[in-house]
Amino acid sequence: MLFFVQKKKSTLWKFIPLMLLITCTVLFGVFSSKLSDDNTRRSKSTLERALTRSITQCYALEGTYPPDIDYLTDHYGLTYDSDYYYIDYHYIGSNLRPDVTIIERK
């Protein structure tokens, strides 16, 4: 009587596609998080430059600093997402540069 010896197939090969999928998902999550942080930092930097440029332009053209942010948005085309950023604007006087702080809302 002949007995056939069956080799058991390794179960390791069954899990390789699953492990590759999990690895790709984790790497995608890590890189997308870094990309999001980089975009947030660039967006804040762009807003800071636009705000500085608008304040300087107002002073150069009118001889006084703008009294508030609304003045800059109305007359100098400053736009920003007020749901995402809060601009703390302290007007000191017409001949003194205002104190400006940009705060991210989360």
Image (tube, rainbow, N blue to C red):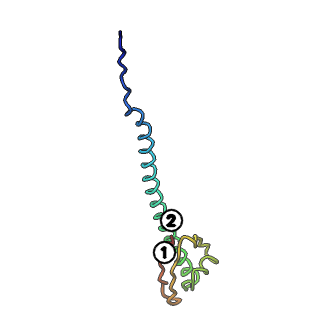
Kind of residue at badge 1? Ile
Say which mark, if any, is on residue 21: none
In the image: residue 76, left or right of residue 26? right
Q: Is residue 23 above or below residue 64?
A: above
* Mark 1, other Cα within 10 Å: few <14 / some 14–19 / many ≥20: few
The residue lying toward the viewer, choosing from 66 and 102, is: 102
Which residue ends up furthest to the bottom in the rendered image? 93
Residue 70: image quadrant is bottom right
The span from disc 1 to disc 2 (Cα, nearest Å) is: 12 Å
Per the image, the residue denoted by label 2 is: 43
Q: Secondary structure at mark 2?
A: helix
Question: Residue at left 52%, top 82%?
Answer: 89
Query: Of all residues shown, which one is farthest toward the front?
Result: 1
The image position of residue 82, as x and y in percent, is: 58, 73
Q: Which mark is residue 103?
A: 1
- Residue at image position (52%, 73%) is 53
Q: Residue furthest top?
A: 1
Against 68, residue 9 (above or below) is above
- Closest to the camera, between mark 1 and mark 2, is 1
In the rendered image of this protein, does residue 90 appear above or below residue 21? below
Element under label 1? strand
- Check the picture and name the quadrant holding the N terminus: top left
Q: Earlier in the sequence, mark 1 or mark 2?
A: 2
Q: Residue at x 55, y 86 (%)?
A: 64
Relative to 27, is 65 on the left or the right? right
Using the rendered view, name the quadrant where residue 80 is placed.
bottom right
- How packed mark 2 is, by other alpha carbons closer than 10 Å (few <14, some 14-19, many 20 or more), is few
Q: As shown in the figure, which amino acid type bears the numbered disc 2?
A: Ser
The correct choice, above or below, for 34 with respect to 106 in the image is above
The image position of residue 60, as x and y in percent, is 54, 80
Q: Position of residue 93 (x, y in %)?
A: 51, 90
Q: Quadrant of residue 78?
A: bottom right
